[in-house]
Image (cartoon, grey):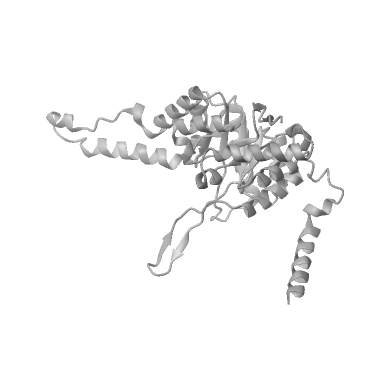
């Protein structure tokens, strides 16, 4: 079976990409991912807040002893800039690029305009093959959706002009008009790809201790339904690559993403539950399914069930919602 695919104009040996997670903190893990069949690896994200906190800590230590006697200068902290948080991350990216032959994709999550630009350029210089940026803004201020989306679009247009490697945007589904925004990213910003969707972690409340609780729940197959629906609606209508994210737990989940039109599929939770070698289980299952259905390559099955390919186009639109409600009501009635 030919599992090769093209994503961000990069040739991948398989459609499975390791999404940004802590597994990629280890070079040995990355090598194991390559051996298990991963098409590419998105490195764990670097956050601007972490860089700022690191810089502020170093500045505080310098200021703490700034007015002491000259004899006390030996007490100044010996801060090696080469070992700063940012430089350690850049070094790790370089090591990952050297250690593998599959594409290494950087992941950036910034909060300031200059942070997006500066860190993206520095990450590009490590030799990564592409850069994935995570757009997330919680609109707590009274700003219009149009204003916020224009801010993001203008930033991405500038960022695309500043770097010379493929740029992919990982989005949330929380846009007033998601398709319109994605089309603008494709046609005005000329991004190389979009990832649908970013998975957020929400705080809970401990009612006994009266405090917020932050925890992480791994994804489930059910969560793939929303991104699959949007990929089916968008595939063939935009020129950039589309990657499916979230909910890849079984071979069936992987197949579904490709059938609706994904160029690549990212996963992480299933590897945390099982092991990195679980990639082989997913890919072997994909080959077996293709053989059973008499397909020889990924290109033959990609998009078979996207919006343009199905006869009943309302299946992915409003009628699908009404049909689901009626089916549930009928099945509940029969159960009684």
Tell me the quarter of the image containing the C terminus.
bottom right
Q: Looking at the image, which is closer to me, 180 or 333?
A: 333
Tell me the quarter of the image containing the N terminus.
top right
Q: Looking at the image, which is closer to me, 221 or 36?
A: 36
Measured along the vertical axis of the image, is residue 46 above or below residue 172?
Answer: above
Tell me how many marks there are.
Answer: 0
- The image position of residue 13, as x and y in percent, is 64, 28
Measured along the vertical axis of the image, is residue 256 above or below residue 67?
Answer: below
Residue 232 visible (yes or no): yes
Q: Is residue 52 left or right of residue 1?
A: left
Residue at the limit of the structure toward the right, as seen here: 311
- The image position of residue 167, as x and y in percent, is 61, 32
Residue 126 visible (yes or no): no
Q: Is residue 139 left or right of residue 301?
A: left
Q: Is residue 236 left or right of residue 153?
A: right
Question: Which residue does the image show at 78% across and 38% down from the upper left?
Answer: 236
Question: Which residue does the image show at 66% across and 40% down from the upper left?
Answer: 285
Measured along the vertical axis of the image, is residue 258 above or below residue 122?
Answer: below
The part of the image, by quadrant, that contains residue 27 is top left
- The image position of residue 181, as x and y in percent, is 69, 44
């Amino acid at each position: 079976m030919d599992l090769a695919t093209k994503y961000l104009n990069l040739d991948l040996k398989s459609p499975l990409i390791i999404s940004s997670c802590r597994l990629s903190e280890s070079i040995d893990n990355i090598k194991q991912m390559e051996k298990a069949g991963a098409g590419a690896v998105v490195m764990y994200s670097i956050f601007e807040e972490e860089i700022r906190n690191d810089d502020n800590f170093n500045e505080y230590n310098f200021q703490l002893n700034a007015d002491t006697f000259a004899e006390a200068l030996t007490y100044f902290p010996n801060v090696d800039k080469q070992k700063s948080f940012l430089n350690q991350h850049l070094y790790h990216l370089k090591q990952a690029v050297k250690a593998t032959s599959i594409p290494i994709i950087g992941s950036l999550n910034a909060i300031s305009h200059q942070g997006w630009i500066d860190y993206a350029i520095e990450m590009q210089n490590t030799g990564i093959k592409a850069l994935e940026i995570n757009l997330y803004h919680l609109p707590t201020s009274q700003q219009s959706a149009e204003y916020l989306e224009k801010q993001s679009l203008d930033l991405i247009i500038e960022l695309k002009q500043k770097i010379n490697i493929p740029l992919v945007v990982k989005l949330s589904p929380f846009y007033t008009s998601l398709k319109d925004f994605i089309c603008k990213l494709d046609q005005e910003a000329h991004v190389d790809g979009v990832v649908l969707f970013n998975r957020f972690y929400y705080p809970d409340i401990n009612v006994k201790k009266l405090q917020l609780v932050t925890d992480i729940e791994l994804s489930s197959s059910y969560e793939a339904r929303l991104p699959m629906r949007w990929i089916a609606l968008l595939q063939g209508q935009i020129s950039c690559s589309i990657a499916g994210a979230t909910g890849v737990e079984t071979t069936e989940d992987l197949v579904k993403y490709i059938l609706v039109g994904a160029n690549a599929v990212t996963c992480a939770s299933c590897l945390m539950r099982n092991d990195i070698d679980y990639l082989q289980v997913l890919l072997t299952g994909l080959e077996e399914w293709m053989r059973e259905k008499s397909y020889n390559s990924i290109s033959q099955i990609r998009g078979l069930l996207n919006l343009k390919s199905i006869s009943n186009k309302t299946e992915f639109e409003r009628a699908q919602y009404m049909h689901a409600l009626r089916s549930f009501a009928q099945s509940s009635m029969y159960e009684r």
